[in-house]
Image (spheres, rainbow, N blue to C red):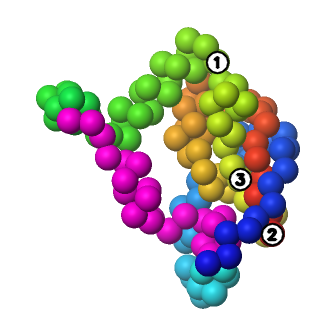
Amino acid sequence: MDKEKKIKIVDVTLKDLLPTVYLVQELANGKTQELLKLARKGIIQMGTSEEAEKAKVEAEELKNLKTSQTSIFESKLNKLDEKYKKSGYNPETDGYIKIFEWENQKYVVEGTMKWHVLKDLYGENYNLKVEEVYE
């Protein structure tokens, strides 16, 4: 599996980005080989066992999620929202959102939850630094 990819820091506006699911849908329509090529390079994540392991939560948090009837994703979004409201977003400490450009459209390939929260907090015209992944 070829995981070699190049990354550069670029400035973008949130409104210019789309979640990865749109890229996957585009490539799934007759461009399967391109989709697999990007997955082999590690640009698009295809749901690995590592990701499933990361999604696991501690027993106490799971208990709280069950009693509050909140999904894991909603819980994570709420935590990011609280954090960014309190101390702002700093890509150097919070981790960069990673993007990939395909046919003149930029897609969020890592950090979609951050993208959603930042868009809600600061609006779609918010500018930020991201890591652009390219071949």
Give the residue at mark 2: 135
Under circle 1, the secondary element is loop
Instruction: Give the amino acid at mark 1.
Output: Gly
Place of residue 53 in the rendered image (x, y in percent of width and height, measured from the top left):
37, 53
Task: Name which residue lies at 60% across and 73% down.
Answer: 39
Residue type indicated by callout 2: Glu
As measured in the structure, the alpha-carbon distance from the residue carrying label 1 to the one carrying label 3 is 21 Å
Q: Is residue 96 left or right of residue 50?
A: right
Using the image as rendered, state which of residue 85 and residue 61 is in the foreground. Answer: 61
Residue identified by numbered label 1: 88
Number of marks in the rendered image? 3
How packed mark 1 is, by other alpha carbons closer than 10 Å (few <14, some 14-19, many 20 or more), is some
In the rendered image, which quarter is residue 24 located in? Answer: bottom right
Amino acid carrying mark 3 in the image: Ile
Residue 44 among those drawn in magenta: yes
Q: Which label's residue is closer to the chain start, 3 or 2?
A: 3
Residue 78, image quadrant: top left
Give me the residue at 80% from left, 54% from top.
7
Residues drawn in magenta = 38-59
* Disc 2 secondary structure class: loop
Identify the mark nearer the N-term, 1 or 3: 1
Quadrant holding the C terminus: bottom right
